[in-house]
Amino acid sequence: MTVKDIEKAAGRLQGVLHHIPLSSSKTFSDMSGAELYLKYENQQKTGSFKVRGAYNKIAKLLENEEVHTVIASSAGNHAQGVAFAACALNLKSIIVMPRATPIAKISATEGYGAEVVLDGDCYDDAYAKAMEIQKETGAAFIHPFDDFDVIAGQGTIAIEIFREVPMVDVIVVPAGGGGLLAGIAYYVKQINPRVKLVGVQAQGADAIVRSFRKKERVFTDSVLTIADGIAVKAPGSLTVEMINRYVDEMVTVTDAQIAEAILLLIERCKQVVEPAGAAALAAILNRKLDIQGKRVACVLSGGNIDVSFIHKIVEKGLITRGRQMKFRTVLPDVPGSLQRFSGIIAGENANIIMIQYDRLLAELKLNEAVLHVACEVGSIEHGEALVRKLEKENYRVTMES
């Protein structure tokens, strides 16, 4: 792969993609201590960057050979990218997705005209099934990340970053299979080796981080993260080689940190970003890398999140930020005790959002009841003040997760 391959990919994508300028963020710049620019690929056609690599690969195939059907395996975003590209280029597409894929991603993929096959528990299982179907049908397989033409398509993001922020110091990119990170890193290091490249993975799906540290391709036995778009056990051989050569640093973030970043993006930027897409910002906000005083571009890689899952993410983010708290305490089982308790909560300007009264625990005395409570508070400090007030009023508080 060469710089010209990425530039040719940009030419193929001309008129196909949405043009989304990088957006400076004063809020996140203040929080991170850097001059931060956000690349909103969640606003891209099909809702993620994946359409870049998929379209470039299929368009190049059509330039060189006769193709009637394409097949891919994906947890969602690559699926939509391939389905869209195939539809735009008048081809049939078959997409194999893990059974746990969010319904929104399945529906969106079918909406682009693809035939969806659900198989396996993760991307790697879906990939194995897709290879079976490919052998049976002879369809052209479009790999989500371990393919130079796909990598070149993803690398076009780097062209856009340089065009809009030519003096960028650091680029932070999420990574699952590694195609996005490899493509951006390759182009950046050919054009301006001074720019630092940082890749981010979820702590529960860190195969590329392990590969980067060992300087060889490493698989993980399992993946466990809310960031389904980067939950990959086996990263690409091409991508790992390129990442080990061109990326400067790899870091991980927790699911709680990702959830907090998603919540902040909703609150401060009015942007809905999926967990994989928010990983890079989570790393920045949690000071996983040294960017103080630097000019930083952060890639928000996608926004395809199941609506039914958003409330879980928001709730987790609220708890992480200390905006919600759960605890239990013991009350006298007499008239008026619940009213007195709720009065204390109201007096501390907290809001009860869930309450459960339990008199059946064996360890309770005959005149006691356990109260399980969830409250909205303004901050961690506000929650701590509430607990101190309750304890001062002789309530024994036990925090719950």
Image (cartoon, helix red, strand yellow):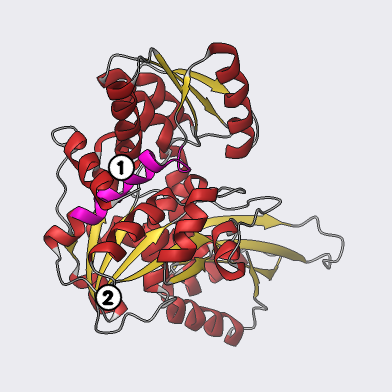
x and y percentages locating residue 396 in the rendered image: 68, 78
Residue with the mark numbered 2 = 194
**Which numbered tag is attached to residue 153?**
1
Quarter of image, res 187: bottom left
- Residue at the spot 45% in from the left edge and 43% down from the top edge: 145
Residue 220 counted in the magenta span: no
Residue 48 x/y as whole percent? 33, 42
In the depicted structure, whether residue 87 falls above or below residue 381: above
As for residue 155 lying within the magenta part, the answer is yes
- Secondary structure beneath label 1: helix
Query: Measured along the vertical axis of the image, is residue 133 above or below residue 210?
Result: above
Q: Which residues are magenta?
A: 144-159
First in sequence: mark 2 vs mark 1: 1
Task: Indicate the quadrant where residue 84 lies.
Answer: top left
Q: Which mark is residue 118?
A: none
For label 1, the crowd category at 10 Å Cα-Cα, with few meaning under 14, some 14 to 19 and many 20 or more, is many
Q: Amino acid at mark 2?
A: Arg
- Amino acid on which disc 1 is placed: Gly
Q: Nearer the viewer, residue 328 or 400?
A: 400
Give the class, few, some or many, for how many residues have Cα within 10 Å of label 2's Cα (few <14, many ≥20). Answer: few
